[in-house]
Image (spheres, rainbow, N blue to C red):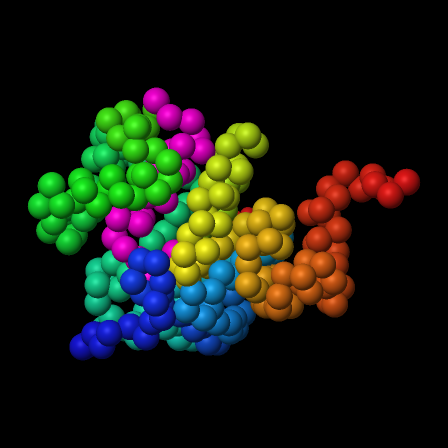
Amino acid sequence: MTEPEPAATASADGASAGVSISGLHKSYGDNEVLKGISMTVRPGEVVCLIGASGSGKSTLLRCVNRLEDPNAGTITVGSFETTHPDVDLDAMRRHIGMVFQQFNLFPHLSVLENCTITPRRVLKQATSEAEAEAMVQLRRVGLEDFAQRRPDQLSGGQQQRVAIARALTMRPQLMLFDEPTSALDPETVGDVLAIMRQLAEAGMTMLVVTHEMGFAREVADRVVFMDKGLVVEEGPAADVIGNPQQPRTQDFLRRVLNPTGVDLEA
Ligand SMILES: Nc1ncnc2c1ncn2[C@@H]1O[C@H](COP(=O)(O)OP(=O)(O)OP(=O)(O)O)[C@@H](O)[C@H]1O
């Protein structure tokens, strides 16, 4: 299969790819987790996926870069049809950075080595070239002075910032974030969200699964609310979070924004 240049718009890093998802179904055995999802992320746009635990958000994200194989439907990222049986998965994944809840850094490697290993192995970059790029990205996340440390010498928030820098060394056209702050101490969450905000402002296309409603409200161009494998409501954050129309969205937000049920107005 040939690889035409991905459709892209200019961004601070060169290019941003859009995502188009159509009629996506995914089951694990008898459990139908995605029941026909269609949505788009335009180049340079930030879309936050919100929804209750188990609604299928991670599964959707993992289908985008084919960590999961959907049962039906199509997904395109730029000009890559990621669901095509003949798609070159390695070539496709070079364009897609992914940041997980757990940072998945190699514990025995330095921060710098964690950021150079993939460009050296996959892009066959010389060590000097890979290190120069890694330092650019570590500077971007404010960790250039930590390059020689091992992950266990960093806080959770710092480790997540390394994971973001590591993804950026591949100069991706799309970044997928799966609850990137859920495993962090509260005081480090803001640092990670600030980096994500900078990326958004630089024009990176981002699809973000998050429970951070403040981030979604302030940074997302659009918010998609999922429930039980379906998109229930989507639109600008001010609408979906600020003035939800669907009862299921209203219930979810009531639980998330005021989990104790205490009447805060009283
Ligand atoms: N590898 C798997 N094998 C079997 N079932 C799975 C697998 N991954 C997810 N599931 C199931 O799919 C459903 C959706 O899970 P998913 O992680 O996509 O939801 P989510 O909305 O991201 O939830 P959370 O917010 O808790 O991460 C759940 O019922 C889950 O148990």
Inspect this view and state whether residue 15 appears. Answer: yes
Q: Quadrant of residue 21?
A: bottom left
The image shows residue 254 at horizontal and vertical percentages of 75, 51
Front-lying residue, 69 or 21: 21
- Which residue is pictured at 24% across the width and 74% down the height? 5
The image shows residue 207 at horizontal and vertical percentages of 46, 59
Front-lying residue, 15 or 86: 15
Report the label total: 0
Inspect this view and state whether residue 62 appears. Answer: no
Residue 151 is left or right of residue 218, and the answer is left
Residue at the extreme right of the image, as rendered: 266
Residue 157 falls within the magenta-colored stretch: yes
Q: Quadrant of residue 110?
A: top left
What is the magenta segment's predominant secondary structure?
helix
For the N terminus, which image quadrant?
A: bottom left
- Which residue is pictured at 49% across the width and 43% down the height? 194
The image shows residue 184 at horizontal and vertical percentages of 50, 34
The image shows residue 86 at horizontal and vertical percentages of 23, 73
- Which residue is pictured at 25% across the width and 58% down the height? 94
- Which residue is pictured at 34% across the width and 22% down the height? 153
Residue 110 is left or right of residue 22, and the answer is left
Residue 223 falls within the magenta-colored stretch: no
Residue at the extreme top of the image, as rendered: 153
For the C terminus, which image quadrant?
A: top right
Q: Which residues are magenta?
A: 153-175
Q: Is residue 206 above or below residue 20?
A: above
Q: Quadrant of residue 72?
A: bottom left
